[in-house]
Image (cartoon, rainbow, N blue to C red):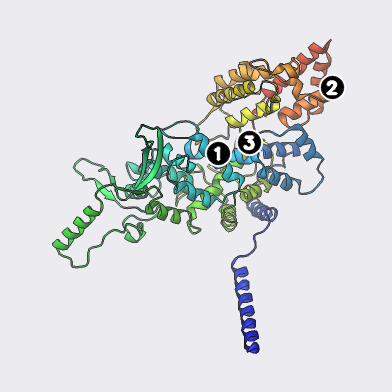
Amino acid sequence: MRSSQNRLAGILVVFSSMLLSTAAQAAPKLPEPEKAAADVNLLLREIWTEAFTNAAPMASEEALFRRLSIDLRGVIPYPDEIDQFLNDRSRNKVSKWSAWFLQTPDHAEFEAEVWEHTLIGRKGNTDGLDRGSFRTWLRKSFLANKPYNELSREILLSAGLPSNDPAVNFYLRYEAKPEDMAGKVARVFLGTRIECAQCHDHPYADVKREEFFGFAAFFARTQRYRDYDRAGGDSRRYGIRSRASGELTMPPMKKGHRAMEIQPMYFGVRYNRPENYSPLDPIPKLKAGGSKLDRKKMESKMMMARKGSKVTDYGASNRRKNLVKWLTSDKNKYFARSLVNRVWARFLGKGFVNPIDDFSEDSKIILPNVLEYLTRDFVASGYDLRRLQKIIVLTKAYRQQAVQGVPGGIAPGEEHDLFTTIPIRPLEPEVLVRSVLRATGMEDPHPENNARQVKSYVQKAEREFVRRFGVDETEKRTEFQGTVLQVLLLFNGEFTSSKAPASRPYHASYQKKYPGNLDVVLHGIAPNRHVDQLFLASLGRLPSAAERSAFARHAQSARDDAQRQSALADIHWALLNSAEFLHSS
């Protein structure tokens, strides 16, 4: 008996080891981000060599660190962080610091800001929209490094009230209109534009009207509703729920044509193939040789099934579940690839496909091997956004010097370049607000110094900066489009100008409506290093020998402390209004 038990145990051990071996072979270990970045660099080097082109020189350590802080945290670095980075002698310090940035709450907050703009825009409000709860939910998701496919599923399957499921704000922003949802979902999660096909077949991409409305039909049973309290009173709370039935009708293109009910259809497939429709609502097929009576019965059955719009539950409909299952599948070539392209473009100023939300079968993809490598790695990592971002910032393409003018040194009129340099990019409005506040010592006011008034001032300043500097989130941002309002605000505006000339002592600076904080910026710094500190606080670097000499003479020309404070304020003001401060890289 014991012999047979031992024999059985031995068989189980062998069988288990075989299963573990098979699993290990099926799921090869991912390379470390540093190794993945090195693989990308090899691909880049091969492409650059074949094209007989050279990449730009590597950026200085100070420029690279400032770029990392802006791209990963949405704000310029502190002077003491710059000192620590420059004095760090480890060979992998860029990897180490980027990993730290990616784990900070600042990164989660910045990612939430970026994705709020991507999903529901900077501006615009609809009934029931709660931007605060949506931003908080996004921040918590990024702080937990939630996989991108899981984040997407939660957004697209959301239902109920924002207080219970903040992700429903995505649907509330567009009032859950099927046509609007189809266009937005295709742009954000598939990286392609299909709105043109709403009125006519897409003039460039292979998208028919039936395909657009077929994709929109997945949202035909998603409904926005108003929530009423138990006492029967009115309420301005809105939520999202699903109906048991309801179809989308495609309007006729010409007079005399009939409207046409459209069934759900996955994007990128021919609409006249029934097998490509949603399995939930397959197109009824008439049996071969069927009579007119059979056809009439079938049509009657379809009409009965589509009557009414009774609400069965407040969860996601089966249609949305089927859509999300297809959309977030590892086999969906649009989903992961469009996200990789979006993140690459955000860090390097341009994507593998441009515009970033215009993928199609005929898209001209620059460096397709690099895009394919990063996409495979992203899927294999379980859609790890932090890992993807770390790999990109470790590549030579990202770590190059930024240059003025035509990106990559290509001839004007060319559509793409080979990422042989990074274009100089203007700071986003919100990044500019935070950077001004940090550079001027206004970022973290002490509670005992009238903190409520300062917080109110900061919020007012942020709104004003965003209003004056704001651009649509779909616009290209590779060149700084200065306007008269922007220039006047920076040089004469009450917000920025109030920050530079700060001759008041620190303890009293917060008692003014528009305080200045030069004393805070220079607190604890020896007088002979004041100019260096202003450069570090504003531009993230030390001054050149010529700059230090010129500015030091200006400060030393003062006859007393008051004049010296004024001279230092002049220097600070000049740095805050320089093109170098206004731009990344």
Q: Which mark is residue 136?
A: 1
Residue 297 % position (x, y):
17, 60
Q: Measured along the vertical axis of the image, is residue 557 above or below residue 209?
A: above
In terms of depth relative to the viewer, which is nearer, 254 or 187? 187
Marks 3 and 2 sit apart, C-alpha to C-alpha, by 30 Å
Q: Earlier in the sequence, mark 1 or mark 3?
A: 3
Quarter placement of the C terminus: top right
Q: Residue furthest top?
A: 559
Q: Earlier in the sequence, mark 1 or mark 2?
A: 1
Residue 188 % position (x, y):
48, 44
Report whether 29 appears left or right of 203.
right
Give the residue type that dot 3 points to: Gly
Give the residue type that dot 1 points to: Thr
Question: On the image, numbered disc 2 is attached to which residue?
Answer: 527
Task: Say if mark 3 contacts mark 2, CB within 8 Å.
Answer: no
Can residue 458 be seen here? yes
Q: Measured along the vertical axis of the image, is residue 434 above or below residue 158?
A: above
Task: Identify which residue is drawn at 85% across, 24% down.
Answer: 526
Q: Which mark is residue 173?
A: none
Q: Residue furthest front?
A: 231
Q: Earlier in the sequence, mark 3 or mark 2?
A: 3
Marks 1 and 3 sit apart, C-alpha to C-alpha, by 17 Å
Residue 2 % position (x, y):
65, 87
Q: Measured along the vertical axis of the image, is residue 328 above or below residue 536?
A: below
